[in-house]
Structure formats: C-alpha cells, structure tokens
Image (tube, grey):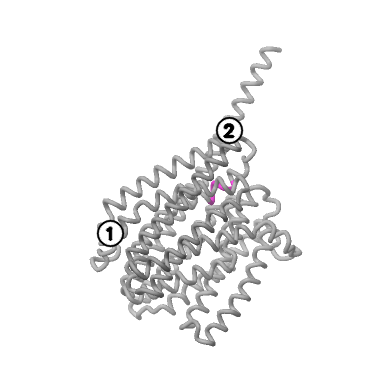
Amino acid sequence: MIYYRKVERHILKAMEENKQRSLIGSLLRGVSAAITGTFLVYFLSGIIQILLVRQLGRIIYGEYATITATLGLIASMLGFGLDVWVLSEGGRDKSGLARNISYVLRAKLFFLLILFTVTAIAWLYNYIETPIYILGILGIAFDSFGSTFYSALRVINKNGIVAIIQVFTQSAILMVIWFMQKAGLDIFSIFALQTICSGLVVMLLFVILRSLVGDLISYKFELNYIVRGAWLFVFADILSNTYTQSSLVILGRMVDKEAVGLWKPALNVVSLTFVVPSLLFLVGLPQLNSVAQEKKKYQKLIFVMAVGAVLYGLIVLIGLWFFGEVIIRTLFGVDYLAALPLIKVMSLVPLLKSGSFVCVTVILSLNRQKLRVGLQAIVTIVSVIGGFVIIPIFGLYGAVLLYVFIEGLIFFLYTGSVIYLLRGEWK
C-alpha cells in the first residue's frame, strides 16, 4: 500500500509537470505561429510605408499621417476595445464565443451608423476639409470588424489562419501600390485601396468563422450583457488611442504637418518592434485566464512572459541606438536622416512597451479592468494637457519627449499595480 501511494504521488507529480510544460508549450507555439505571420505582415506593411514616404514626400506624407492619426482617434468610437473582451471571455468560456461575436458585431454596426451620421454632417458644414474622412471611416469600420474576427480565431487557436490572411492582404496592397507609383499616388487613392481590401477580407473572415463556430447572426441581442461585460474594455481602448495618437494630431494640426512627416517614419520603425510584446499579450491572455486558479502554472507563465519581454526590449533598445542611422538611410533615404535623434530618444520605448503589455495581461487575467482604466485615465489627462501645453511651444522634439514620458509613466503605473495585486493574490 505504501509503495502504491508513492507510485501514485509520482505519477500525479509527473502529470502536473507535463501539464505545466504543455501550457507553456502552448503559449510558445501560439506566439511563434503568430509572430511568424505577423512579422511578415509588419514587414510588408513597413515596405508599404516606405514606398509612401518616398513617393509622397514629407509634406504630403505628413498630411496623410495626420489624417491617419485622427482616424485612429475616431476608431475608438467603433468599439475596438470589444475585441479584447472577446479575447478575454473566450479564454474563460469558448462555448459562448459565437454569441459574443454576434453581440460585438451588432454593437459596432450601431456605433458606425452614429459615426457616419456625425461625419456626414461635419463634412456638409465644412468642419472637416475632405471626403477622405468618410472613406477612411468606412475603412476603419471594416478593420474593426476584421479585428473582432481575428480575436475570435485566436481564441480557438487558429493563429495560422490569421497569419495567412493578414500576409495575403498586405501583399495585395503592396503590389497595387507598387504598380500605382508610375501613375502617381495621392491620399484618396491610398485610402480607397485600403478600404476595398479590408472589406473583402471581412467577408472572407465571416465565412471562415461561421464554418468554425456556427451561426453568428441569429442570437437575440442582450444589451445589458455586453454593456456590463465590455464597457470597460471599450473605455480602455478610447483612452489608449487618445494618449497614443493625440500628440501626432496636435503636432499636425497646431504646429507643422512636415514635422509629422519627419516623426512618423521614425515612429513607424519603433512601432514595428511592438509586434512581439503585442502578440505575447494576444496569445498569453487566454492562457493566463485558463489557469487563473492554479497558482504554480500562473506564476510560471508570468515569469516566462516577463523574462521574454525584458530580454526582447533590451535587444531592441541596443539595436535602435547603434543601428538607427543605417535603418533610416536604408529605408527612407538621406533626406530623413534628421529623424535619427528621434529614434535614439524613442529607443527606450520598446522596453517600456514590452513590460506594459505583460502587466496589462496580468491585470486583465485578474479581472481588474477598472484599475487599468483608472491608470489609463490618469495617463490620458497628462498626455492631452501636456500636448496642448508643450507641443505648441517646443514643437517636434517636445512631442517626442512627451511620447517617451507617457510610455514611461504608464509602464511604472502598471508595474506598481501588478506587484501590489500579485502580493495580495499570493498571500
């Protein structure tokens, strides 16, 4: 009997260790699959931006970047935060995925109707200068629906499908832009191309998801359910978009669009490095939610994510600092070497961003979304007020320094909160 008990304990211990290895293996496989595809997507997207920068020039590209940043703020009104809710809830209960997708799509359609109405009125009364905004809103609407479908596919571990579709889409856009160079590019044609591609992708994703999870339409809409479960995610997305895009918008609207045309290429280079921590968040959140009640597995996953984020952030920091000139010269040409000091100043951001992604993953897995929103509200207030005070006085460099400061502030607020929360959870 004693021997039997020893064997039983040994088997149970081995099973537990295998489960932990399987869980971490699942995390790493998910991240690897997503990274492979997303690196290709970001690479292709980067080439597209390089072509646009070279073709349009600083002034017109600065105008394009200002419109894009403005549309980024408007995108919050379409409930992009609902996609994180789909991802988070899917990690807890996959059986309700089709219902949640149905609710999110209907909510986004409602927001879209309101947004189109307001935009059309603003255009008629000349509050916005160009019909490009209407076309742009249609484009971000398709992107919003696509984002919901991509989140749903990640919940059911279909990262490969996500990668294939995203790579194919960016490849198609790149090919069209490449051939359009000779005919001459303008801002309207660029937005039109992106909108058409996004619309076709949404239809494809709808068909794929319907075959995988079933009917996405016939569910009776329950407003209380989605408001109660998702309003914090939407509010968090609005705040996040505001503090990340407001400096670009203020710089372009109040100071100089050409300054935006210089900063945005440098910002594109830095933003490209966010792919790994963002995918760690997208793949890691469902994993953490699935083991939230198992302390050892939970701790191990957090440790793996944190170490990976720090190592990655340090490598990127060193790379941007020492090879920034080569990157700028190769990608954008000598006319943009003035952006080198901006890249060096922003080289710390990938490290801060990597840590922030891990912290947000932990906060959401602990169901502390209200805390996240509160911290984001503080950062947003500082960012907007700081933007209106600092950027008109100090111009481009004031905007860049404010951007780095804001990323540092949100990182330290998130980190302090996570340490406090985990101490309470693990007592």
- For this orientation, the residue located farthest to the left is 334
x and y percent of residue 44 in the render?
A: 40, 62
- What residue do we see at 29% from left, 52% from top? 321
The amino acid beneath tag 1 is: Pro
Element at label 2: helix
The amino acid beneath tag 2 is: Lys
Residue at the disc numbered 1: 341
Q: Which mark is residue 372?
A: none
Q: Which mark is residue 296?
A: 2
Left or right relative to 278: residue 209: right
Residues shaded magenta: 282-286
Left or right relative to 36: residue 120: right
Q: Nearer the viewer, mark 1 or mark 2?
A: 1
Element at label 1: helix
Using the numbered discs, state the Cα–Cα distance from disc 1 to disc 2 in whole angstroms: 44 Å
Q: Is residue 280 visible in this depiction of the protein?
A: no
* 110 and 344: which is toward the camera: 344
Q: Quadrant of the N terminus?
A: top right
Q: Quadrant of the C terminus?
A: top right
x and y percent of residue 86 in the render?
A: 62, 56
Q: Is residue 357 visible in this depiction of the protein?
A: yes
